[in-house]
Amino acid sequence: MAAILPRNSTRQADALRYGNIARLTNRITGVVIVGFVTVHVLVQAMVHSGWFGEAVARSQFLLDLQQVPLVHAILFFSIAFHTLWGMKLFLGDLGYVYHYKTSLFVVGGIASLFALREALRYVGL
Amino acid sequence: MNAMLKTITVKAEVSRFNPETDEKAHFETFEVTGIENMRVLDVIRSIYEHQAPDLAYQFACRIGRCGTCAVKVNGVPVLACQETCKPEMRIEPLTPFPVLRDLVIDRTEVEERYANLALVPHRDHEHEGQPEAVAPDLAHEICRLDSCLACMVCVSACPAVEERAFDGPAFMLKLRQLAIHPADNMDRLSQAKEGGLVECFGCDLCTQLCPADLSPAQAIRDFRNDLLFGR
């Protein structure tokens, strides 16, 4: 009878690297949040303080830009994913460990629901 | 060849580097025909035996126990003796280690780091009489952590090693093994902190790719838990 080894063959080079996907998504969503907040603060400052003259203050597109549905959907996804993934990492350090694959799907799924809700709002649903 | 076994022709791009003649590594393409479930190591050996007798590579046990045959296949670090071959493969040496030649990396720094960590139980006083009693569950956990192959697959896969001052998951795992050892009194948590414990991203790539089915990420989380709550 042949010896049975604990692991006889892997297909690791075929598999998705879930941790890397989560890490990169976490990083990208973080950049999106910081970017949006920066733009939002600057726009509000320009519109309300009149730093750049009356022309800027009257520019409706600066305000409209913040109401674009796609931007909202991306922003909501980013906030939800970044927050939940951060909590997942912190909970792991506290001793509450969740499997990396399950975590990615659950956090990504919940974050997608926020984005979907926002997207549906703008199509009247 | 057994008629029941399907055959496959593999196209393998193998990284070649000879420090005496090459300034940087380049890829050479080989075709190897063999049984469908042959391993990456079988492909490399076939290339060495039939097409490129000057190809440098390493292996020893062929059963996933020694960790010396670790290479990158299509960008993912694996044990060549365990990974099933693919129709198209790009085989490279492990990063970020210096390459001696072709697929062989220089493990000098790795061995030095292991030596500097003093990975044997250190006692406060001379050992007397019977060794310390170890609870069966703890003994099992220590033995499990001891099954690390030191293949450096996790270190090669780790994004924190690439970006930050982090020694790598394998070293954290070995430190954890000693940290829970009842006969060890060295401050392993401080060693782990010096090795970049807090730099880990918590992505669990090391856990996913570990050929010994260990979880260096969990060892890091346990250390961080100690850091938060004391031990």
Image: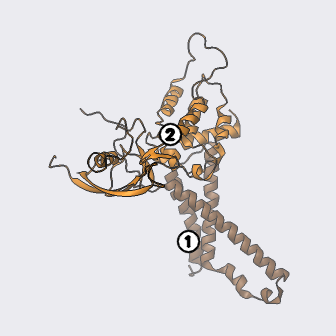
Chain colours: A brown, B orange
Query: On the rendered structure, is B42 left or right of A40?
Result: left
- Residue in view at x 70 percent, y 38 percent: B229
Query: On the rendered structure, is B115 left or right of B9?
Result: right
Name the residue furthest front: B21
Query: Horizontal and vertical percent for residue B175?
Result: 59, 34
- Marks 2 and 1, how far apart at CA: 50 Å
The residue wearing badge 1 is A116
The residue wearing badge 2 is B107
Query: Horizontal and vertical percent for residue A16?
Result: 45, 57
Position above or below: B217 against A2? below
Q: Which amino acid does label 1 sit on?
A: Leu
Mark 2: secondary structure:
loop
- Front one among A63 and A39: A39
Q: In which quarter of the image is the N terminus of chain A?
A: top left
Name the residue furthest top: B129
- Front one among B196 and A47: B196
Residue A15 — which label? none
Q: Quadrant of the C terminus of chain A?
A: bottom right
Mark 1: secondary structure:
helix
Q: What residue type is labelled 2?
A: Arg
Query: Horizontal and vertical percent for residue B176?
Result: 58, 34
Position above or below: A3 against B104? above
Name the residue furthest left: B3
Identify the chain of the residue marked 2, using the numbered disc in the image.
Answer: B
